[in-house]
Image: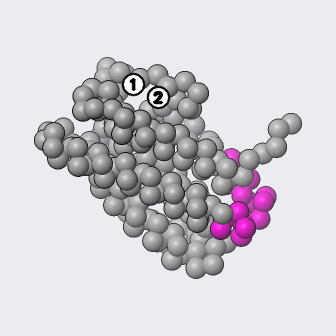
Amino acid sequence: MPETDDAAKEIAREHDEIDRLSVRICTLSAGADRAAAVHEACVRFAYHVHVEEKHLHQAMRRHLPDGSAVVDAQRRRDRAVLRTVEYCELPDVETDELDVLVGQLVVGIQDHVERYDADLLPALIRACPLAESRRVAELLRAALQAVRDAVKIGDGSKRAPVDAESMPEPHHRGLRGLLHHRAAETEAERRGYAT
């Protein structure tokens, strides 16, 4: 039986995929290909952050020194990127403004990945018991796979371009709902207890 990955490895794998997508965006000129890549990055990052907050942040709050402060600081950074995601997804953004937003999105994604990979995940590896880290990894894996299945995102092994007809308007409403309804958090979640 293969060794079970821990939470840090699971998130690092997801970070690699999102980072590759942000690098791909940088190589594309304005047009349909870049618009599709930006949309995929927006969707992917929004759900990625949601899954991290739901599963990984609880472990970070419990096990990292000053875990609540660390998580709160990361949430503020992620919220700034999510505001950029929201603006990138608006239908009538001028080309020049969209170029600036796309640049901010790429920098925000890369900052998120670098901060987690350089600081937060190594700290979590040192502080979190392996059994709990493996349990969180299973939750992360299941949640990320559910997102991939729901919005037709590949697992990185096969990247099929998302065609406009396969992504109907309700998906966009769902993303907006995710961005707007995330502030509601129970006291138990804020303190890092499993709900």
Residue 151: x %, y % from top left: 44, 32
Residue plotted at (58% across, 66% down): 119
The crowding category of the residue bearing disc 1, from other C-alpha atoms within 10 Å (few below 14, some 14 to 19, many at least 20), is some
> Is label 2 in contact with label 1 (beta carbons under 8 Å)?
yes
The first of marks 2 and 1 along the sequence is 2
Left or right: residue 40 versus residue 63 is left
User: The residue under label 1 is which amino acid type?
Assistant: Val
As helix, strand or loop, the secondary structure at mark 2 comes to loop
Question: Which residue corresponds to mark 2?
Answer: 152
Q: Tell me, for residue 31, which label it has, or none.
A: none
Residue 146: x %, y % from top left: 55, 37
Q: Nearer the viewer, residue 115 or 150?
A: 115
User: The residue under label 2 is which amino acid type?
Assistant: Lys
- The magenta region covers 123-138
Q: Tell me, for residue 162, which label it has, or none.
A: 1
Please identify the residue farthest to the bottom as the structure is shown: 66
Q: Is residue 46 above or below residue 79?
A: above
Residue 115: tell me if it is visible.
yes
Quadrant for the C terminus, please.
bottom right
